[in-house]
Image (cartoon, rainbow, N blue to C red):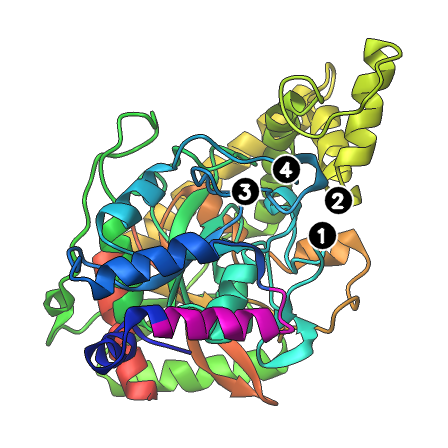
């Protein structure tokens, strides 16, 4: 892994062009399959400009990888799907505009589960992403390419998006830091939607300080996104300096014996830092996973209706009849998991079932929010294992239901819209384990400051 400070140190004695070229060489020889599309020509041009003296911005000369569902002008954006395999956007997402303003060098677009639907990046049309710690294992999903690129030293920074754990899962599996910000802190303008009410773009990096730096760049006001909160973010780790925080362990969020053993070690470390530990219960969590999948799939079925081969996406050469054409385009353009979620979402929204499923799921969502609000009145922050298991082998989880259950610790955060960070807390059998740190709305500074304390102690 490469940190921003390490990269900047190298820039003092080496040319940015040579360093970026070296990175591309590594990517092209790699087995991780972390990237779908490389931005080589443009990235080397930007590195050359840096060498010529154009060094303005918080991220001047720093390489970054972008998840392939974030719109990049003149750079292919596929969502990991055959449906958009030839799509080249004509505009930049808000976060991309910010990165360019701050001088970042965009390396390319990272591999992901098709339309962000998955926990392993095995549903990608462009092939599975391999874990940098063990290439026979998954990198997590849906931002698996971004996690693997950071974890494998194929970028310094990366952007992911998180609908139900899609930043935190690969962060945990690839041993990197990943933050799902408060819903509305980062503009979603230019993010190709899966489930609008749940998803957020967020930063991924090798350490906490770099994650905070990237959040400073991408957070902020954007009038093109009606859900944007219009807030900026500035990292100030002094906020908790010398303070004793009350940290709640969420009783309903667990994991395998190996994961829990490593998590218990992290809890002991937190106690040694002088913070108070207590246990909190979230009764609504037993319904959260089911509610999440009903809401996410319902929104997906609505969002993905636009991909009909006429307005958007993959198209056929011949048109027999409209209904046959529409069905064939979607049958060929979407993968099995996307089709499964569209069908389940359409069913949940259909007449006679809307109230039985979708409305009930929205009520559960309110209960989850209430549980978080109650717990965060008692505690400053909450913690839990990010993922209930170690990274599993490629092809090991063939059953969709078992796969959905892997999101049990991450989806409640998206239902409530609160921020959460996955912090690497060590290795078990050579594989990374992540701890989730959860805070109240717009408490990113406290989360990152606390994570920095723990990270320093762990190292």
Residue occupying image coordinates x 34% and y 68%: 17
Q: How many marks?
A: 4
Mark 3 and mark 4: Cα distance apart in space: 7 Å
Q: Secondary structure at mark 2?
A: helix
Asked whether 46 or 237 is in front, the reply is 46
Between circles 2 and 3, the one closer to the viewer is 3
Name the residue tied to disc 3.
76
Q: Nearer the viewer, mark 4 or mark 1?
A: 4
Q: CA distance from mark 4 to mark 1?
A: 18 Å
User: Tags 3 and 4 in contact by the CB under 8 Å rule?
Assistant: yes
Between disc 1 and disc 3, the foreground one is: 3
Mark 1 vs mark 2: give the one in front: 1
For marks 1 and 3, the one nearer the N-term is 3
Asked whether the residues under the numbered discs 1 and 2 touch, taking CB atoms below 8 Å apart as contact, a structural biologist would say: yes
| Residue under numbered circle 4 | 86
Classify residue 292 as left or right of residue 249.
right
Q: CA distance from mark 1 to mark 3?
A: 19 Å
């Amino acid at each position: 892994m490469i940190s921003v400070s390490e990269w900047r140190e190298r820039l003092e004695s080496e040319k940015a062009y040579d360093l970026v070229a070296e990175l591309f060489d590594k990517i092209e020889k790699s087995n991780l399959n972390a990237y779908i599309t490389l931005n080589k020509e443009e990235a080397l041009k930007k590195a050359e400009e840096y060498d010529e003296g154009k060094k303005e911005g918080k991220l001047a000369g720093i390489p970054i990888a972008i998840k392939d569902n974030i719109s990049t002008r003149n750079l292919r954006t596929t969502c990991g799907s055959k449906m958009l395999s030839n799509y080249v956007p004509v505009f930049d997402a808000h976060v991309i505009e910010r990165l360019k303003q701050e001088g970042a060098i965009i390396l390319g677009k990272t591999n992901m589960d098709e339309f962000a639907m998955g926990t392993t990046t095995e549903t990608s049309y462009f092939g599975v992403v391999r874990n940098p710690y063990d290439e026979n294992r998954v990198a997590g999903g849906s931002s698996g390419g971004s996690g693997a690129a950071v974890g494998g030293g194929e970028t310094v920074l990366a952007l992911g998006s998180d609908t139900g754990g899609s930043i935190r899962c690969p962060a945990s599996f690839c041993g990197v830091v990943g933050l799902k910000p408060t819903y509305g802190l980062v503009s979603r303008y230019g993010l190709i939607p899966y489930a609008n009410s749940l998803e957020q773009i967020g930063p991924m990096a090798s350490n906490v300080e770099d994650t905070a730096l990237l959040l400073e760049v991408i957070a902020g006001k954007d009038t093109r996104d009606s859900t944007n909160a219009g807030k900026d973010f500035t990292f100030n780790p002094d906020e908790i300096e010398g303070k004793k925080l009350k940290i709640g362990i969420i009783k309903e969020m667990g994991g395998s014996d190996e994961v829990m053993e490593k998590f218990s070690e992290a809890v002991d470390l937190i106690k040694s830092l002088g913070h108070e530990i207590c246990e909190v219960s979230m009764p609504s969590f037993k319904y959260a996973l089911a509610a999440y999948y009903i809401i996410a799939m319902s929104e997906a079925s609505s969002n993905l209706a636009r991909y009909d081969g006429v307005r958007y996406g993959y198209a056929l050469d011949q048109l027999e009849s409209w209904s046959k054409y529409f069905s064939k385009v979607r049958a060929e353009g979407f993968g099995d998991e996307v089709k499964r979620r569209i069908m389940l979402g359409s069913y949940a929204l259909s007449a006679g079932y809307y109230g039985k499923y979708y409305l009930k799921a929205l009520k559960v969502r309110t209960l989850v929010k209430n549980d978080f609000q109650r717990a965060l009145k008692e505690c400053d922050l909450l913690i839990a294992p990010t993922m209930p298991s170690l990274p599993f082998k490629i092809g090991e989880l063939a059953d969709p239901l078992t796969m959905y259950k892997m999101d049990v610790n991450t989806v409640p955060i998206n239902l409530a819209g609160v921020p959460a960070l996955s912090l690497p807390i060590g290795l078990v059998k050579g594989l990374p384990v992540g701890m989730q740190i959860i805070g109240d709305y717009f408490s990113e500074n406290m989360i990152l400051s606390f994570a920095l304390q723990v990270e320093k102690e762990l190292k």
